[in-house]
Image (spheres, rainbow, N blue to C red):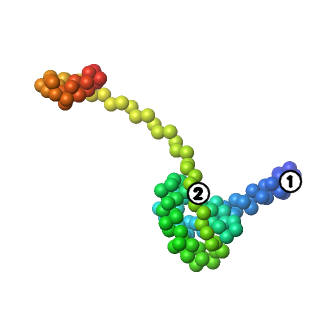
């Protein structure tokens, strides 16, 4: 138990803990002033030098936040925050890989219908397209 208590007194961990508290406080303020649709796609990181730093998930969200800056600053002042500017940065989140779609296969009846129709429309662009389609489905 002695080792664990000395670990908690580590100055590097104290700095990290302070930084986490600052970020949580900034995020709480951001969640109260930002519209819900923007708060979902953005995060506040800190308040330094009377400036609130906000990270947006994409450029569209960042542009919308920049359009709302005057009203957001007024709301911050009403909350008695000493913030005079909001700095918006884009920080794209990595997205999970999409599942590969399994190709669908045509039923034998559908393939024969396509073949019949392509034979009826021989010599036309649609007939040629249907011919290629039923041949790849076979």
What element does badge 1 sit on? helix
* Residue located at (56% from left, 54% from top): 90
| Residue 61 placement (x, y as % from top left) | 49, 58
Residue 112: which disc? none
* Residue located at (55% from left, 45% from top): 94
Determine crowd level at label 2: few under 14, some 14-19, many 20+ residues with C-alpha closer than 10 A: some
> Would you say residue 114 is visible in this rendering?
no
Give the mark nearest the N terminus, 2 or 1: 1
> Would you say residue 57 is visible in this rendering?
yes
Q: Quadrant of residue 107?
A: top left
Q: Estimate the spatial distance between the alpha carbons at disc 2 and disc 1, rounded to whole Å.
A: 38 Å
Q: Give the label, 2 or 1, closer to the camera.
A: 2
Contact, mark 2 vs mark 1 (Cβ under 8 Å): no
| Residue 108 placement (x, y as % from top left) | 23, 24
Q: Quadrant of residue 118?
A: top left
Residue lying furthest left: 120
| Residue 133 placement (x, y as % from top left) | 26, 26
* Residue located at (66% from left, 63% from top): 46
What element does badge 2 sit on? strand
Judge left or right: residue 11 versus residue 77. right
Judge left or right: residue 138 versus residue 123. right
Q: Quadrant of residue 23?
A: bottom right
In the displayed structure, would residue 69 be above or below residue 136? below
The residue under label 1 is 6
- The quadrant of the rendering that contains the C terminus is top left
* Residue located at (74% from left, 59% from top): 17
Determine crowd level at label 1: few under 14, some 14-19, many 20+ residues with C-alpha closer than 10 A: few
The residue under label 2 is 89
Q: Nearer the viewer, residue 93 or 31?
A: 93
């Amino acid at each position: 138990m002695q080792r664990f208590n000395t670990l908690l007194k580590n100055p590097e961990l104290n700095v990290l803990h302070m930084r986490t508290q600052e970020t949580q406080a900034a995020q709480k303020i951001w969640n109260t002033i930002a519209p819900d649709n923007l708060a979902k796609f953005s995060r506040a990181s800190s308040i330094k030098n009377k400036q609130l730093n906000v990270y947006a998930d994409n450029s569209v969200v960042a542009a919308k936040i920049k359009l709302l800056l005057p009203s957001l600053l007024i709301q911050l002042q009403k909350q008695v925050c000493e913030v005079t500017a909001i700095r918006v940065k884009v920080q794209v989140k990595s997205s999970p890989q999409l599942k590969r779609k399994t190709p669908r296969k045509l039923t034998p009846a559908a393939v024969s219908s396509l073949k019949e129709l392509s034979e009826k429309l021989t010599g036309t662009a649609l007939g040629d397209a249907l011919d290629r389609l039923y041949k790849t489905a076979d």
